[in-house]
Amino acid sequence: MIVLFSDFGVAGPYVGQMKAVLARLAPAVPVIDLFSDAPRCNPKTAAFLLAAYVTEFPPDTVFLAVVDPGVGDKRRRACIVRADGRWYVGPDNGLFNVVAMRAHSLKWWDVVWRPAQISNSFHGRDLFAPLAARIATGEEPPGNLISGEERVIADWPEELPEVAYIDHFGNAMSGLRASCLSPHSKLIVKSKSVGYARTFSSVPEGKLFWYENANGLAEIAVNKGHAGNLLDLDIGTPVEVL
């Protein structure tokens, strides 16, 4: 399958245009919409979010991931990554850095292929979607295989102590894996101390708490409330661990 991960938003033509390319070049391959509202123009934060979701998908899944504020800049490379049996296609701007840091097996290609026609501002449609289709239909990566260590940004933290995503319910996912915390840990956000609970029904209505979400991230929530509004949270709001 091909899994879409982007900051394009759910409105407008962008995701639809990428899916049209996939339908033309890989019509038999299922396409899954994972995120269309990844942290906007923020590949670093998006990288921690992406890494939390990939393990739910089987080997040989192709992640077509585009958070690409440097699109059109000749210094920004395109890449194909194979990490722990899954494929990643997109810009080489840090978006796959966390996946690569945590991988037990890693291969990395600098992509040299370019289509006959390519716009300056929409490589998601013109470059990355055709590449994803080629990989998903069994073609070899059209690029130069290099050592993945050459591309991994070594000075990134193992965990991201920030808000990485706020969902429809107002729950705020951090870039912290809950497995790195203790049920006794407190999260300090906007000067508020937030204690742990197993799930929403474990606390009274209106109570602020953090829990391990379904993809292993420490997530801040309010039972039947909106944590994002209550704490005035944004992507990038710091989260301190005590």
Image: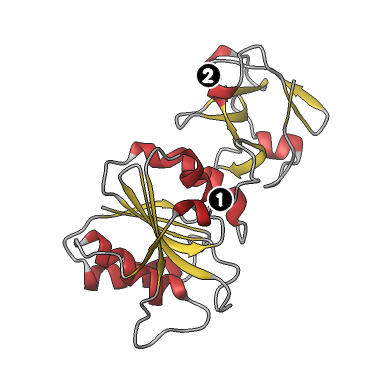
Q: Report the front residue among 77 and 130.
A: 77
> Picture coordinates of residue 237 (x, y %)?
73, 42
Q: Report the front residue among 217 and 191.
A: 217
The residue that disc 1 covers is 46
The crowd level at tag 1 (other Cα within 10 Å; few <14, some 14-19, many 20+) is many
* Residue 226, label in figure: none
Q: Report the front residue among 80 and 30.
A: 80
> Picture coordinates of residue 4 (x, y %)?
39, 56
> Picture coordinates of residue 180 (x, y %)?
58, 23
- Residue at 59% in and 27% down: 224
- State how the image is colored: secondary structure
Residue farthest right in this picture: 191
- Residue at 60% in and 47% down: 154
> Picture coordinates of residue 115 (x, y %)?
35, 82
The Cα atoms of the two marked residues, 1 and 2, are separated by: 25 Å
Please state if 32 lies on the left or on the right of 185 as rendered: left
Q: Could you tell me the amino acid type at mark 2?
A: Thr
Q: Report the front residue among 154 and 29.
A: 154
| On-image quarter of the C terminus | top right
The residue that disc 2 covers is 199
Let me know if residue 13 appears in the view: no
Please state if 103 lies on the left or on the right of 140 as rendered: right
Disc 1 on helix, strand or loop?
helix
Using the image, determine if residue 186 lies above or below residue 127.
Answer: above
